[in-house]
Image (cartoon, rainbow, N blue to C red):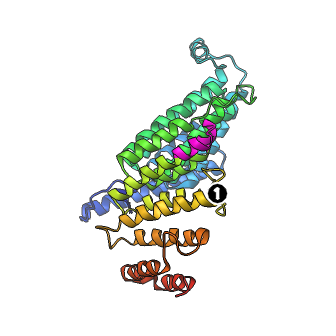
Amino acid sequence: MQSHGIPRVAATTLDKSEQARNKERKQIIQYQALERDVVDRVKAKDYSDTTFQLTSQLLTQNPEYYTIWNYRRLILQHVFARELAADEEPSEQDSAAAEKANLPPAQHEVLLLIKEDLQFLIPLLKQYPKCYWIWNHRSWLLGTATKHLPAHSAVTLWQAELGLVSKMLGLDSRNFHGWGYRREVVLAIERLNSNGDDGEKGSGTGNMVESEFAYTTKMIQSNLSNFSAWHYRSQLIPRLLSSRKADTNTRREFLDAEFELITRALYTDPYDQSLWFYHQYLMATLNPSNAQALPVLDPCGREEHARYLEREIGSVREMLEGAEDCKYIYQALLEYSGLHLEVEGEGGEVALGEMREWLRELRGIDPLREGRWRDLERKMGS
């Protein structure tokens, strides 16, 4: 399976020789025996280190086997509970290491186990970067660290995870698993930084919205066709403006800068649908009746809404030169013009006759959606 040129699993060369088939049969028999052994051990509640190592062998061969990940977590939960309940005196070496980490010996042992399992996942993540269960297990490990360890220890693990996910997105900037996981990691770091070890709410110093917004800018500049980066940016904007305590003028300047950014991108490649999604998002923030997009300008009056619509319709119309076969341009023109008619009525920037011409062009470019275009034509009163 491929996604935007990045394979889900590293490509391998298939060898159809008899020798290769015999080798594969042997591997299958060994795999099935290993699977039976692990299942039988877990059913018998054998949560020993041997069972744990066998799950490692099985998951290395098949990381998509989510049941085995569940078994691995059962074993780890058993080990964590045992370590935290232990009352025996640790060795002098273990005590010194725990003191250096500013942790009690039991918590330090849990920290080491979590770090070891996180390290086990790295080669798997490199080979299978889009495997849900690997990302899910890392999230569980870090959540367990948050539950059992002081904030200062847990946040160090989460910050290291942010560095890892940045590297992963550097290798495949449009890996939506990575982007979704990044949002989870950032949220965990913010919560830990805003709460002390006693669990009391802090002063909000954990806010990472500025650095994350800058990160989306960096990723967009390296690759305009990055829907996940544009989407993340749209999620950050309301928090960013609130964090900055932006007044009306600051918000207007910010919005104009975002329109300038996306317009430059659209002139670069008007055929990229991810860019149009972000432009639609910005336009939606101006529409008071659109509850799905939080307003950037608050309030945005009818006259100001009409001015933005007129400006953007004019800008999009200019994109037609040299891109007359781009359906996204016609769709945007029809959508924004329809909104403009609702706000201002006829006689303004857009005439119904021009909209009908755009619709005719669109029907020729995209005949597979003829039913949709007929419906739009009826709404226009044609």
**Neighbour class for label 1 at 10 Å: few (<14), some, many (≥20)?**
few
Task: Residue 223 in the image: state x and y as whole percent.
Answer: 36, 50
Which residue position is annotated with label 1? 301
- Can residue 165 be seen in the rendering of this structure? no
Image: 11 above or below 139: below
**Which secondary structure lies at badge 1?**
loop
Image: 267 above or below 182: below
In front: 3, or 91?
3
Q: Residue at x 61, y 57 (%)?
A: 293
Task: Residue 51 in the image: state x and y as whole percent.
Answer: 56, 43
In the picture as drawn, the residue positioned furthest to the front comes out as: 347
Q: Residue at x 57, y 31 (%)?
A: 113
Task: Residue 318 in the image: state x and y as whole percent.
Answer: 36, 64
Image: 313 above or below 129: below
Q: Which residue is drawn at 45% across and 61% down?
A: 276
Q: Give the range drawn in magenta.
A: 239-254
- Please tell me whether the stretch drawn in magenta is mainly helix, strand or loop: helix
